Amino acid sequence: MGQASPSTNAKLQPVLIIHRGRDELRETDPRSPALAAKPRCTLPLMHLWSDEVQARLDATRPLAARMRPQRLQDIVGQAHLVGEHGLVRSLLAGSHLGSLILWGPPGTGKTTLAEVIATECNRPFTSANAATIGVKQIREVLDASRRRIADGGPPGILFLDEIHRFSKSQQDVLLGDVERGIVSLIGATTENPYYTVNDALISRSTVLQLQSLEASDISTLLNRAIETDDTLPADVLPEAIALLADRCEGDARRALAALEIACHLPSGGAVTADVAEKAIGARGRRFDRQGDQHYDLASALIKCIRAGDVDASIHWLAVLLEAGEDPRFISRRLAILASEDVGLASPQAVQMAAAAWQIVERIGLPEAELTLSELVIYLATCPKSNAAAKAIWDARAAVRELPGIEVPLHLRSGHTRGASELGYGKDYVYAHDNPAAAAAMNNINPGSEPPTYYTPSAHGFEATIKQRLDEEGS
């Protein structure tokens, strides 16, 4: 067989690099000079076009990779992006793609969507990890795309996984050409990009949020795999599919990996729910102490306690503990809530929170879960008021607006040298001698109406405080 001509090879559009290492690129454009200079494949050239060899390579890929959709209409779920009126479909219908950041949990199709976008746009696609791609590799991708445009071709697409790990030096090389349209950047991240991605990237990109897939979507993918993949047996029972779809928690990759394992476990017949359960294992809990979920779960606990929903409060406490949250963090949040949301309606709440925090510090988990449970139940069921918190918030806001701070003369210290000549302490009323007159003093801004910061509620102990203040004012 003669060697194929360059023009013939270009028409075949082979995938010249398979992403085998963290620092390697995968590009579908055969004209890339970077790839020509650094060939990665050691197979004879004729083997690149061998259907038999390609079939063997495909067979080694995991099921999730073999089932990766190639067309937009084959993507399951994410209807808000790829549906009839979805944003991605609208972007593809236009002439300008721009740069995108795909944000979502693992296994929701971020990489798939990026590759499908490149296919639908008929543009060269380069894939790399943001943490390991070097400045030199970025320059090679940019130079290749610039030459392609000069030759009348389309600009390339650079896909960077873990875009939140993109360094400033990498960003500086890339951003100018991204802004000029030399290359379209598509980043993928499981972290909230508004917190973890550089502002310069955010301002140049459209952020698309992907959601965890519904169980029905997962079932569709699993059934499609059984019907189309020759390596899987057709005898997978519906209850096995249902269990995998429920247990994977919206992660299509995990569900497909578990299906492949289940199909190769010795079962003596059909793949049953028991076999599927062995394959997927215990229900996992995704939790990132540095990410959004860390704060979302804490927020759920605090809001349920504030609303007095005791069962929901215990539920979210249990979720935090099962997720492995630091009990000291929970104690801190509950101590803040005791002051902010319970306040003087139940003054002992702060004491209980302080005691619980100390117990958590001393004995730790698992026994400290009992202490936290008691505290959460008490805080959820006791009278609540944020009047004390609102008082200091309002007072500080008012102080910030003052042109200057002057202590009224009658409140100044009269014991310093020359204080009496300056009138310091004059007209001060000693409260133990004349409580009524002392209460009538304007201790903030004499000559003007004093502001009112604290207005007690009628809840719990604050009702008693309100009564005291009313009696003093009468």
Image (cartoon, helix red, strand yellow):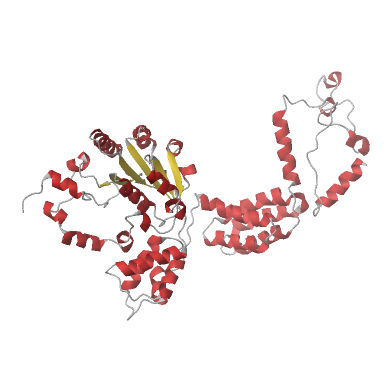
- Foreground residue, 33 or 427? 33
Q: Is residue 61 left or right of residue 238?
A: left
- Foreground residue, 320 or 238? 238
User: Which residue is found at the position 58% from the left and 62% from the top?
Assistant: 318
User: Which residue is found at the position 49% from the left and 56% from the top?
Assistant: 287
The answer to whether 460 is drawn above or below residue 160 in the figure is below
Give the quadrant of residue 69.
Answer: bottom left
Q: Is residue 242 left or right of residue 340?
A: left
* Residue sticking out furthest to the left: 1
Residue 358 in view (yes/no): yes
Q: Is residue 334 left or right of residue 203?
A: right
Give the quadrant of residue 297.
Answer: bottom right
- Foreground residue, 1 or 63? 1
- Quarter in which the N terminus is drawn: bottom left
The answer to whether 122 is drawn above or below residue 310 in the figure is above
Q: Is residue 58 left or right of residue 77?
A: left
Q: Position of residue 24 (x, y in %)?
A: 27, 47
Q: Position of residue 391 (x, y in %)?
A: 75, 41
User: Which residue is found at the position 44% from the left and 71% from the top?
Assistant: 242
User: Which residue is found at the position 36% from the left and 58% from the top?
Assistant: 74
Q: Position of residue 57 (x, y in %)?
A: 22, 60
- Quarter in which the C terminus is drawn: top right
Residue 355 in view (yes/no): no
